[in-house]
Amino acid sequence: MTHTTDSTDKPPYLRIAAEIRRRVEQGELGPGERVPSTRHIAREWGVALATATKALTHLRLEGIVETKPRAGTVVATPTTPARGPRSATPTTPPGPSAEPDLSLERIVRTAVAIADAEGLSALSMRGIAARLGVAAMSPYRYVTGKDDLILLMADAAFGEQFYPATAPDGWRARLELGARTLWTLHRRHPWLAQLSSLTRPLLLPNLMVHGEWSLSALDGHGLDTTTLFDIHVLLYSHVQGLAVHLEREAQAAATTGQDEDQWMDSRGDALRSLVESGRFPTFAKVVSSFDDGYDLRLDTLFELGLKALLDGLAPVIEGRPLA
């Protein structure tokens, strides 16, 4: 619905901010939930996108909302610690008394949590030690450095999901399960897609579990080994190629302070110029057909691409003549 202006002298952006603040205070929007985007605010209140952006900026400055990696603009969590300088006298001072509980497993688990929340760029050995409440050099007793730690993190992440002892019937069902399992892990840990290229793969035991599942699904269909391995790599590249954008979007949001809706709204003039130029009629027709803009959904693209790949590969795997 469209809100009508009231009799107060408050600027529109303050009235919008006050309404969203009310929703938060009354529990209609909980911590971590996405707040209305600039486009939604503009439509609901009948204001310009610039006014909607100003309202969200006002709420962000008040600490009511925050721009969170991989989530966009969400209701701020009151219990989230400030990211400013740490206190010089922490509640639990680091020292020998805290370190008997330190282990490689705890270090890896803590590092994964940091990378999940803030990306690999936020990961440092000193930061991990601070999060664990131990001396800065203590993690080095368990791991030689950040590069080795990242490999341990990746191996742990890929080891979070395994496969049933009894495989589903048919190569396609097995490949679908393998691809969706990998997609789930990349969704859970977006930094995984940033670690290596296809030409320099990670040689990790738990990643090999997924590779073994895929290769065994393709084995026994008369494929030469090169074709068999090419198909395996192609399916993995589909997962990795889409998942890489999860972390890139998080980095872009952190750098610009804008979620993807806000970023697109700020490019409205450039988009309008392309549509109205007359040079791209099909693009203009498609874009103009969207009532509320195009919503890029990586999960949908993953499923669409997986089906297209397997449909196209079926004749090759099953030995049927190509059309």
Image (cartoon, helix red, strand yellow):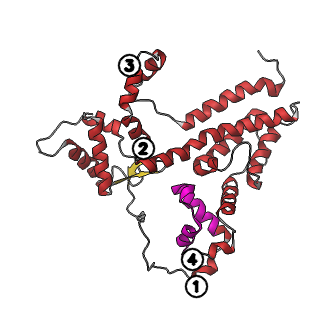
Location of residue 121 by image quarter? bottom right
Q: Are marks 1 and 2 in contact (CB under 8 Å)?
A: no
x and y, in percent, of residue 176 in the image: 70, 37
Q: Are marks 3 and 2 in contact (CB under 8 Å)?
A: no
The residue beneath circle 3 is 276
The residue beneath circle 4 is 134
> Regarding mark 2 in the picture, which secondary structure is present there?
loop
x and y, in percent, of residue 166 in the image: 79, 45
Question: From which residue to which does the magenta span run?
Answer: 106-135
Q: Please identify, in this view, whether the residue under mark 4 or under mark 3 is nearer the observer.
A: 3
**Amino acid tagged 2:** Asp
Point 43% across, 19% down: residue: 284
**Amino acid tagged 1:** Ser
**What is the CA distance from the residue labelled 1 to the residue labelled 4?**
9 Å
**What is the CA distance from the residue labelled 1 to the residue labelled 3?**
68 Å
Point 35% across, 42% down: residue: 36
Dot 3: few (<14), some (14–19), or many (≥20) neighbours within 10 Å? few
The residue beneath circle 1 is 97
Dot 1: few (<14), some (14–19), or many (≥20) neighbours within 10 Å? few
Work out whether mark 1 precedes mark 3 in sequence or the reverse, and give the earlier one.
Answer: 1
> Regarding mark 3 in the picture, which secondary structure is present there?
helix
Q: State whether residue 30 is above or below residue 129.
A: above
Question: Tag on residue 158?
Answer: none
Q: Is residue 155 left or right of residue 136?
A: right
- Examine the rendering and report whether any part of residue 177 can be seen: no
Is residue 303 inside the magenta stretch? Answer: no
